[in-house]
Image (cartoon, rainbow, N blue to C red):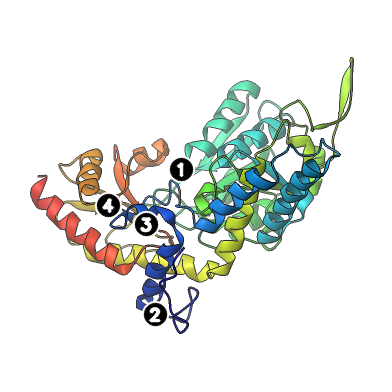
Amino acid sequence: MMNLMTETDQRVFSSTASSVENSKFAKALKAEFPIFHAYPDLIYTDNGATTQKPARVLVAEQDFYTRSCANVHRAIYTLGEEATSRYEEARKTIAEFIGAKPEECIFTRGTTEAINLLAHSFGETLSAGDEIILTEMEHHANIVPWQQLASRRGIKLRYIPIYDDGILNLDILPQLLNRRTKLIAVTMISNVLGTRNHVEHIIAQAHSAGVPVLLDAAQAIPVEPINVKELDADFVAFSGHKMYGPFGIGLLYGTRKWLEALPPFMGGGDMISEVGLEGFTPNEVPYKFEAGTPPIAQAVGMAEAARWLSSIGHQAAGNYESELGQLLIDEISLIPGLRILGAQPGFPLGPRAGIVSVTLEGVHAHDLAAYLNRHKITVRAGHHCAHPLAQRLGVVSSARFSFGAYNTREEVFTIAEILQKAHKELL
């Protein structure tokens, strides 16, 4: 893969570099992504749905299939031992990436499966009348599994509301916490608004009441380093494909205390230590939660994505993406009829990721997305798997721009220009 940078060019995103300098690095970074060689004019701003993949991630996954392809934990032949070694090394890499221990890291198919796993296993410990606290801004993946649990076991769901500016009203949290509260499940970053929730405060409040916390880190993991021990989180869920890794792989982190206490989710091979006709003994953690053949090659690719993120300046990259989001807001805020969700006049913008969702009066979000697509700009249009939040904001659908490490300031200016044209041409 050709390298556009010279020896004197910036090699990583930097917190001390200007937005213009970081944008130059972002432009050079595109050389590492085969998709932009295939589509050099593409302005990809659907990173909240999935990120593109650097070549080294694709190579790592392909290398597993061509050099180490065998099932894990089952073979005593060399190839099988090599596959197992690479799979467990991937677990170790991801554990180090989030400040955890390998035995606290369960590989899943993604954030959705991770939360469903917890909802089923944790749900087995609950009784009718117990309560779980969610928020109005959750992705369906962090609402529906708990609604299903509520239906099965008679538990009650309570919700932290949001202000008009898209910030959680945490003043109400002490009123929601009570002796029947068994869990708080909250997103770190809203996939619609980009709001970065004050999860540190939520965890502290919850733990003072003896309540564990699950963090949905799907949108957070690509834009900020996460240390689960420093956060003092009990559970954290995220996906590989949103952090420049493969599809079909994710992670559920849980403290060893909780993972050993919870029953397994699925039954089958590898999650047992012994099976008889009358019952079984589950395997040790994390294997008791990994029934069947795991996503081995995807785990290898996810680990490479974690290494890649660390190599480019993880925190600075996330800060840069936030700057792009703010730049877009600044450039489009005066377009007549255009509403930026969560950015209300008179309200200061709180901490936000590079996610900007908009509506254009008189234009359906799908029509706006199709118009942008004709100009080679990709956006997500719809309710973004957050129906309750859309209803709270009074919108049917919106167009969402979500930035990644390879987006540039020039692309933001192009988007703003096209939105200006859309206002004139689509109304």
Q: Which residue is mark 2?
A: 18
Calculate the distance from the C-alpha at mark 2 to the C-alpha at mark 1. 35 Å
- Horizontal side of 340 relative to 268 (left or right) equals left
Q: Residues within 10 Å of mark 1 (few under 14, many from 20)?
A: many
The image quarter containing residue 204 is bottom right
Residue 282: % across, % down:
84, 31
Q: Which residue is mark 4?
A: 377
Q: Earlier in the sequence, mark 2 or mark 4?
A: 2
- Horizontal side of 315 relative to 164 (left or right) equals right
Residue 225 in sight in this render: no
Residue type at mark 2: give it.
Ser
In this view, 213 is above or below 224: above
Q: Which is closer to the viewer, label 2 or label 1?
A: 2
Calculate the distance from the C-alpha at mark 1 to the C-alpha at mark 3. 40 Å
The image quarter containing residue 99 is bottom right
Q: Which residue is mark 3?
A: 37
State if disc 4 and disc 2 touch (CB < 8 Å).
Answer: no
Q: Residue at x 84, y 35 (%)?
A: 283
Provide the secondary structure element on which disc 3 rests: helix
Q: Residues within 10 Å of mark 2 (few under 14, many from 20)?
A: few
Q: Which residue is mark 1?
A: 136
Q: Which is closer to the viewer, label 2 or label 3?
A: 3
Residue 358: % across, % down:
28, 50
Calculate the distance from the C-alpha at mark 3 to the C-alpha at mark 4. 16 Å
Calculate the distance from the C-alpha at mark 2 to the C-alpha at mark 4. 25 Å
